[in-house]
Structures are given as C-alpha cells and as structure tokens.
Amino acid sequence: MENENMNKITINIGPVHPSTHGVLKFVVEIDQDTIKKVEPEIGFVHRGVEKMAEMKYFNSFMPIADKLDYISALNWEVLYATTIENALGITVPPRAVYIRTLMCEMQRMMSHLLFLAHVGEDLGNTTLFMWGFRERELLMDLTEEVSGGRLAPMYVSIGGLYYDLPEGFSEKLLSTLSVIESKVKNEYRAMSYENGLFKMRTVGVGIISREQILKYGITGPNIRASGIKRDLRKDEPYLAYDKIDFDVVTEKAGDAYARFMVRVNEILESIRMIRQVIKDMPTGDVKVKVPWIFKIPPKYTFVRQETPRGEAAMYLVTNDDQKPYRLKIRAPSFYTLQAVKELFVGSKVADLVAILGSLDPVPGEIDR
Amino acid sequence: MIYDFFYGVLNAHFSSLLSGIGAWFIVFMIGGLITINVPIFLGWVDRKLSGRIQARYGPVYTGPFGLLQNVADVIKLMGKRFITNQVIDPLIYNIVPIAIAMLGFLMVFIIPWGNAGLTLLFIPYNLLFIYIALAVSPLLVLLAGWGENNKYAMLGGFRGAAQITTYELSLLIVFISVAMLAGSYDISTIVSAQSGMWYVVYLPITLVVFGISSLAVIERGPFDIPEATQELQAGWKIEYSGIRYGLFFIAEYVRLLVISMLIVYLFFGGWNGPLLPDYAWFWIKTIIVTFFMMSLRWVFNRPRIDQLIKIGFNWLLPLAVINLLIVGAVIFF
C-alpha cells in the first residue's frame, strides 16, 4: 500500500497552464507518466450570466450573450435573438435570415480555424498555431468591416440586424474564402492531417464511445467524429439552412484525429455554404422595428441551435415583465468536459493535452 | 591550432611558463567570446527563420534587421532579480546551468572551425571528446529535475534522461561507423579521408540516424519533450530564471551548431571542395545544414515520450548497428 502511494504524484494542470484553453484546472494523479485519475475543476470564469440575464432588459443581455463563448460570439447572438423573437412572435425579414446564416458560418469557420491552431500548439507545432490565426485574421477583418467588432461583434439585434452588409462585402468574402480553401487543402494538409508525426500523436487517442456520448450528453463535431450523424442544421433546420445544400460531415474512428478531420471538413463545408448563401441572398430590409424595452407575456420558450462546439440551447421563462424570469443556458462544452474523467484515464500526460485540445472546450461557456 | 600560434608569438618575448599562461588566457577569451556570440547570432537566425515560416517578421526593431534583439535579451536576463523556490537544492540548482554552458564551451574549444588548423586546442581524438560533452547531459538534466524540487521539473528530468540515454547509443554507433571507415577519431583525418567521395554516399542511413538522434540528444524541437511547454510548462527548466535560464540557451545553440558542423564533417566532406577556399566550402555547407536542422522544429510536432523511445530502440538503434556491421564487413574483406 505504501509503495503504491509512493509511485503516485498529484499534479495540478492549470488554471494557468499553456494548453488549458483559458482557465481550466485538472487535478491529475499520475503514476510515472500514466494518468490514473482526473478531476476537472471549473468555475474560474464564472460570472453568473444566468442570474445577470434576470436583472437586465431583454435587449441589454445581448453583449453578455456575446461573451459566453468568446470564440463563437455570433452564434450565441443569433441564438439569443432567436429565443426572444420566438417569445415575441416576430418574423425576421428574409435578408436578415440569410445574413445571419452567413455570419454564423463565418463564425464557425473562425472557431474551427482557431481549433486547428490550438491543436497544433498543443502538440508542439507553433507554426500551425500561427497559420490558424493568420487565416482567422482574414475573417476577423471582414467581421470588423461588417460590425465594427472583432471578437464580440454585437451585430445581431432582436428583430434582425443592426446594419446591412457594407458595399463590396461579398466580393471580398468570396476571395477570402478561396484563399482559406486553398490553405486548408494544401498547407494545412502538409503540416497536420497528412503529416506522419501528427498522425502518430492523434490517431487512436482519446476515443469517445457511443455509451459515453449518451452518458454525458456530448454533442456537435465531437460526436460526428464518432460516426453519429446528428446536426441541428440538418435535423431541425433553422435560419436558412433548409434552403441551402450541404452535407453533415462525419468520421468513424472517434479519436482525436477524427475530431480534427471533422473540423477540417466542416471548414470546407462552411465555405460551400457561404458561397450558396451569397448567391441566393435576397434584397430588402434587415430588421423589423422592436422597441428597446418591451414586455413578453408569460410563456416558456425553448430554442436550440448548432454552435461550433455542439448544441447550444436557451430556455426562457417570461413573466409579463421587461426582464426574463429565468434564462437557462445549455453550453455544449460543459457536457463535453465531463467526459474527460473517463477519456484521460490510462493515457499519458502528453495525451491529456492532445485530447483536451481535440475536444475544443471554451471555459467562458463552461463556467458561464 | 590557435593555442600553438599564440604560444609561438609570446615565446619570442617571454619565458615558456609565462607565454603558456598567456596563450591559454587568449585562447580562453576567444573560446568564451565564440560561446557567447553563437547563441546571440544563431538565436537571431532562428527567430527570423521561424518568423518567415510562420508568416511573421521576427525581431525588427532592435538594431538593423533586429540583429541586436538577442543582445538586448541577454542584458535583460542578466538584470533580472534572482527568484527561486525555497525548497531547491542550492548546490545542484546552481551548478547545472553553469555545467551545461561549460559543455558548450568545451565543444567550441575542441571542434575545428572550418580548417584543420582552426582549432583552439588540438586533441587527437576530438570526435570522441565531443561525444563525451554531448553524453554528460542526461546526468545534468536528471540532476536539474531533482534539484529544483518541482513535480513538473522531475517529470521533465526523467523524460530527458530516458530520451537522451536512448539516443546516445545510436549516436555513439554512428560515430564509431564513421571512425571505422576513416580509421581515426580525429576530425581532420575523417575529412581528408573524404577527399575522394563524401561519406553520405556510403552511409546515407547513418546520416538519417545521426540527424534524428542528435536532435533528440540536444533536445531540440521537434524532440524537445523534456521541456515540452504545452505539457510540462518548461520541464526541467521550470524553476530557472534570469541568467541561469540564459545559460541554457548557450547550450542549446552551441550544440545545435556543433551538430550541424559534425554532419558536414562526418558526411559531407568537411572543407573539401573545388575552386573556393576550404573554410568557404565548410561554412557554405554548415549554413545549409544548420538552416535545415533549425527548420525541422517549425515543421513537425512533438512525438510522445514513449513513441520517441520506441523509435529509438526499435528502428534507429538496429539500423545503426546493422550499418556498423556492414561497414566492418566492408573494411574487413
């Protein structure tokens, strides 16, 4: 017994660690280099967002919805705006719907490019890290041109959008898309997914099984990598997703490499979708008038959408007041992170980093 | 033999004891200057090269093309306050960086700098001496990991010791095969033995084995597993700061340069070449090899420690041994 304890070391990975994607902490028990037990500790960026929502007018919550998942702010903006619109019973003009679809897909590409960058960084390849940021920067500039913001754009408003797209935007976007497409298909292939050392580190590492998916409620690209064809954009189409043609990307293996490949292919799929959206973009107004302060009659509203990290949902309870009675937020990363207790055990310390990177958690969203 | 040159110059005016001391002093100063300036210049090259690969600029503001950036960094490192953990083992903690920098200094001292005559001190078995200077490092890494009294440092120290001892074996066998072919452990003899044909033609597999093992032994990326930033924060270097940390850079870049020079000496014919003077040929080859060895870090990601050791024992060591046997058989018959 004594000997057993001698071999075990408990180390704290995080909250300040180069590869915990923000402020996550893992208390890890290791035997030599093998992980025996993991306990994730969350809550370092807990801001009480759900309680904050109860104290604010419906419109004033939008900047906070932006900062839930700071990597995919626009998706959350759209989700929150859709929730309030459904509660109010407003229909958004078709042009606004199309622009929202476009921005959602742009945000998905940005998020996935950041994911590719971070996986590269976690495996020790800083070049992939810089390249991921380089391509993301192109889209960030476009977001800035549209909304004035980069990380937290504040572009979507309740009832539509704050502004229409600027002139010449679609041409710029199309040329940017072809740049990104060629980089992902060529440079990234050589650096990551066709690279022997990269495959050595990711193939067969951190396999998520079907049971674990059901047990922990994992969603999004992480389950599509395990061969489950589930995507809310296809299954329960919202925005303009039923009008455009796209495939749900799946992989069979369920390991870190498959999760990487799903994101790579989703970037390419998003490029295809954006091209269609730009082609079919209707003309017209981008918003319906909604007063700044309004009341919503007592009712329950539930909306769920596919963010880059999985299925995000908002459950709104209103009480004929200017503020929500309760706003429950389902953050997909939170459910994914619970699976690490099983995924990390038995792997090496180096694999912890690779698996965590391939799950793509965002602490801002987990802690809320 | 720069020592002999200065000894001769001084001996014309002073007694042999005084001129011996004076020549030693001058040679030490030259060696020290080279040792300090290699990381400063090579570090700048590394930064610029990684910047170009990663679509950045690298240093630009300090000096022309940012050339003085590393000088500024050295000054900053020297000016830093000495901060450390309270539970360290002070003796080991302070000795390791100095010892590691001294190993770099030793290699600078022994290796020829582009010509048979351009060595600071002539030792007949200089290849073996360089191997020894490379081979001491697992002990130092392990000591550092232990002396810092930190969990990350200890993991890094153990990883480092395991990795370096694995790859040293193949490195030694590579040295032996080349020395057998040339019939000497002296670098200038090995180079003159290649005047007809470079050894890379006879020993291409040995070159690959040498390239991989040497990168693993000097812990240069992609094999910087003992100090993996993303896993162990800084591995066995975690508690070091200030100039103690700076001394590790001396070791890193001097050893990188020495490895590149050795590749040129052992496989690419050293200073042999037509038309141009011999040192020019040597430095052209060395620059190309150094750039290649440097850029590997920025192209590949890091393997896992168990995978690296598996590669070392399952592939590189048998390959090196088979090559050695072939070389032996060829020489024997």
Image (cartoon, rainbow, N blue to C red):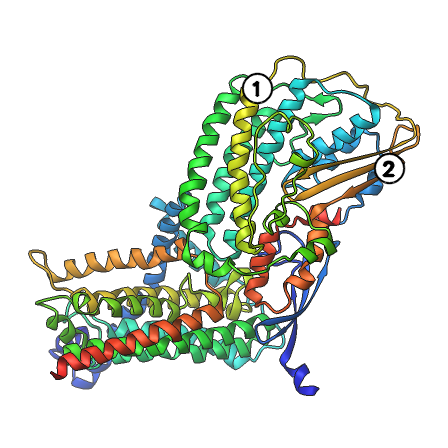
Q: Amino acid at mark 2?
A: Glu
Nearer the observer, B69 or A315: A315
Within 10 Å of disc 2 (Cα), the crowding (few <14, some 14-19, many 20+) is: some
Q: Is residue A296 left or right of residue A41?
A: right
| Residue at 68% from the left image edge and 31% from the top image edge | A237
Nearer the observer, A106 or A141: A106
Q: Quadrant of the N terminus of chain A?
A: bottom right
Whether residue B19 is visible, yes or no, is no
Closer to the N terminus: mark 1 or mark 2? Answer: 2
Q: Is residue A217 left or right of residue A353?
A: right
The label number, if any, that marks residue A280 in the structure image: 1
| Residue at 59% from the left image edge and 33% from the top image edge | A105
In the picture of the structure, the residue carrying the numbered disc 2 is A54
- Residue B51's x, y, as percent? 40, 47
Q: Is residue B245 left or right of residue A364?
A: left
> Label 1 is found on which chain of the structure?
A
Q: Within the image, what quadrant is residue B122 found in?
A: bottom left
Q: Nearer the viewer, mark 1 or mark 2?
A: 1
- Residue A283's x, y, as percent? 61, 13
Q: Within the image, what quadrant is residue B324 found in?
A: bottom left
Badge 1 element:
helix
Badge 2 element:
helix
